[in-house]
Image: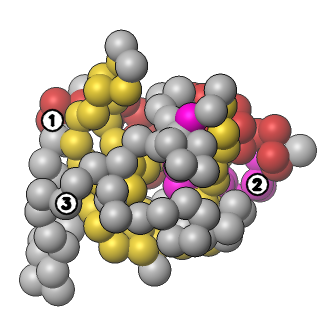
């Protein structure tokens, strides 16, 4: 059941991004997260309701969030859709029924699957929010600089 809900959440989180074992949306490093980098949106300190509302605002008003930093802790999810692999970090509510999350664009030096967490593994990801064009759509992604 959680797999079905995770797939649905991936769709709701702006899915249809991208990539197979060799083919996925990735970004060349443009910025660098350092210990002194200010985190604009630390989702590790937000409850589900606030996080969900903020993620929805990012969906409807992405321009406000471009170039901001974000830290998110949640369940790693990856799926292959028509030869393209997409990645997301899912946050679950307390009942485990209703996920929300963020699409992730890894750095281009990462290789799938070796450099990635396993599906359903909990991780903390820090990076910069960027609008990225994938096919005909442009969406807000977390360009993942740091994986823990």
Residue at mark 3: 29
Q: Residue at x 34, y 73 (%)?
A: 146
Q: Which mark is residue 73?
A: none
Q: Main secondary structure of the magenta part?
A: strand
Residue 37 occupies quadrant: bottom left
**Above or below, comparing residue 11 to residue 7 in the picture:** above
> Residue 112's x, y, as percent?
55, 60
Instruction: Give the label, 2 or 3, closer to the camera.
Output: 3
* Residue 61 vs residue 46, the one in the foreground: 61
Q: Which mark is residue 96?
A: 2
What range of the chain is rendered magenta? 84-97
Q: In the image, is 20 to the left or to the right of 133? A: right
Q: Quadrant of the N terminus?
A: top right
* Residue 72 vs residue 18, the one in the foreground: 18
- Colour scheme employed for the rendering of this structure: secondary structure
Q: In the image, is 24 to the left or to the right of 120? A: left
Instruction: Give the label, 3 or 1, closer to the camera.
Output: 3
**Above or below, comparing residue 94 to residue 139 in the picture:** below
Q: Give the Cα separation between the discs numbered 2 and 3.
A: 34 Å
Residue at far top of view: 136
Q: In the image, is 122 to the left or to the right of 67? A: right
Q: Residue at x 34, y 64 (%)?
A: 109
Q: Which mark is residue 64?
A: 1
């Amino acid at each position: 059941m959680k797999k079905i809900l995770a797939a649905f959440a991936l769709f709701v989180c702006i899915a249809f991004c991208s990539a197979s074992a060799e083919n996925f949306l990735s970004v060349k490093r443009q910025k660098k997260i350092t210990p002194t980098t200010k985190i604009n949106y630390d989702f590790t300190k937000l409850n589900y309701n606030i996080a969900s509302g903020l993620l929805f605002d990012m969906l409807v008003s992405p321009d406000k969030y471009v170039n901001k930093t974000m830290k998110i802790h949640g369940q790693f999810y990856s799926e292959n859709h028509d030869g393209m692999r997409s990645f997301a970090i899912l946050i679950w509510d307390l009942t485990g029924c209703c996920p929300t999350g963020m699409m992730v664009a890894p750095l281009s030096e990462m290789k799938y699957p070796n450099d990635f967490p396993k599906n359903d593994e909990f991780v903390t990801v820090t990076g910069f929010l960027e609008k990225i064009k994938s096919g005909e759509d442009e969406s807000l992604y977390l360009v993942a600089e740091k994986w823990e």
